[in-house]
Amino acid sequence: MEDYSMYKPTNFLYTQEILSKYRSGGYHPVSLGDTLHNGQYTIRHKLGWGGFSTYLIFAQDRRNNRRVSVKIMTADSGADSRELFSLRDITTHAKGDTASRYIVQLLDEFQHQGPNGIHQCLVFELLGFCIDQVLSEHHDEEESLEPNVILRMCEQLLEAVAFIYEAGYCHGDISCRNIAFKCDEVAQLLEKEFFEVIGNPETVELVRNDGQPLPEGMPSELTKAATWDTWIDEDDEDLRIIDFGEAFKQGSEPVKIAQPGPLRVPETIFEDKFDYRLDLWRTGIMIYSFIFEAHPFHYLGGDDTLAETMIGFVEDLPTEWEPRFEQLLLNARRKVEDFKGKLSGHALGLKGYLLPSFMPRHNLTLYSSSSRSRCKI
């Protein structure tokens, strides 16, 4: 855990980005009102942060009179990021394909020299809530997305995944955090109304307790990320797949790929390898999540329990994977016979901490409008 005892206390120290990331090769420190790219982009708000970028920031593009988001990469992530290379290449395959509109639009890219190094900056269209936030809010309010909205989301996601495949790529990290809604209507609002939707910027000065100046490369202030408190446009806005940082060309799969536990594909459990079909598995999980506002599989820290949730819910385990699964059970000091006794028909076993027994199995096939892709759940 970070030690913030040297700074004057504020909640922002614990709810915003990790300060240790501000170092040589790390995050670029920004403040509201700063400009980038020879004054073209003025920073107006903070949209979020991640492991490979300081902020996804909201900025005003003065040259083109539009609102955009700017992703500032860490200096040590390299000038030619995988995301930039992949988006450039995928864009060349658009050629008027309507499905390409469901891929985030790269508007500009440049490099910025800062105290922590040279940072690659990617400029995108301004986007609204990600799916993860929308589903979380609906769950908290005990509401569900309307069926017509779910079907539209599924169709657009399938179209986007089919387009990425036809471009010769795999996104590699399809998740509810990497699918966002457009915000065309909000982006056209007057400034006062715009900030009423995303939330006014809140900043706190970063000050040392001993009165000494901050080290070079540290931000002078901490900014709370936009909350989008009154954004309710998921019924009207289209989807965008974002964050191509894990994307790869088909046939050029990386040795390893980052995977959250509940989203792991079975091939990486039983064969230690994967290909473009990783996107198909993850897309199926997303569609399930759109409907039930939960993942179909639960990861409790062990591959044996994750695999157990898959067996029976999807289909029987392929014969060639059985020895590997038995080894997983033995490594976890579990008996194969005990496992077999827990499954009956399509029951999910593991009792209390798996999917509720009342969760229905659906037989719904969703087709894209171009009939190029489908997903059965």
Image (spheres, rainbow, N blue to C red):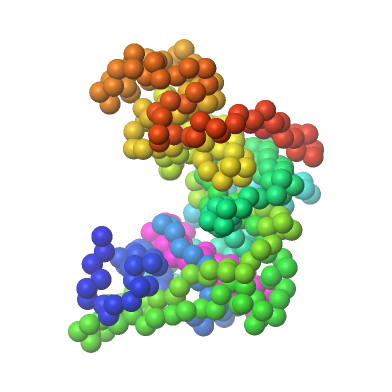
- Residue 48 shown left or right of residue 279 in the figure: left
Residue 210 lies, with reference to residue 115, above or below; the image says below
Residue 118 lies, with reference to residue 285, above or below; the image says below
Secondary structure mainly formed by the magenta segment: strand
Q: Quadrant of the N terminus?
A: bottom left
Q: Quadrant of residue 130?
A: bottom right
Can residue 88 be found in the magenta stretch?
A: no
Magenta stretch, residue numbers: 53-79
* Closer to us: 277 or 355: 355
- Residue 341 shown left or right of residue 177 in the figure: left
Q: Residue at x 60, y 29 (%)?
A: 361
- Image coordinates for residue 234, horizontal then vertical, percent: 68, 57
Q: Residue at x 61, y 53 (%)?
A: 143
- Residue 342 shown left or right of residue 83 in the figure: left
Q: Residue at x 49, y 55 (%)?
A: 80
Is residue 108 in sight in this rendering? no
- Image coordinates for residue 154, horizontal then vertical, percent: 68, 43
Q: Quadrant of residue 288?
A: top right
Q: Quadrant of the C terminus?
A: top right
Residue 106 lies, with reference to residue 212, above or below; the image says above
Residue 338 lies, with reference to residue 258, above or below; the image says above
- Residue 62 shown left or right of residue 227 in the figure: right
* Closer to us: 3 or 106: 3
- Image coordinates for residue 67, horizontal then vertical, percent: 65, 72
* Closer to us: 225 or 136: 136
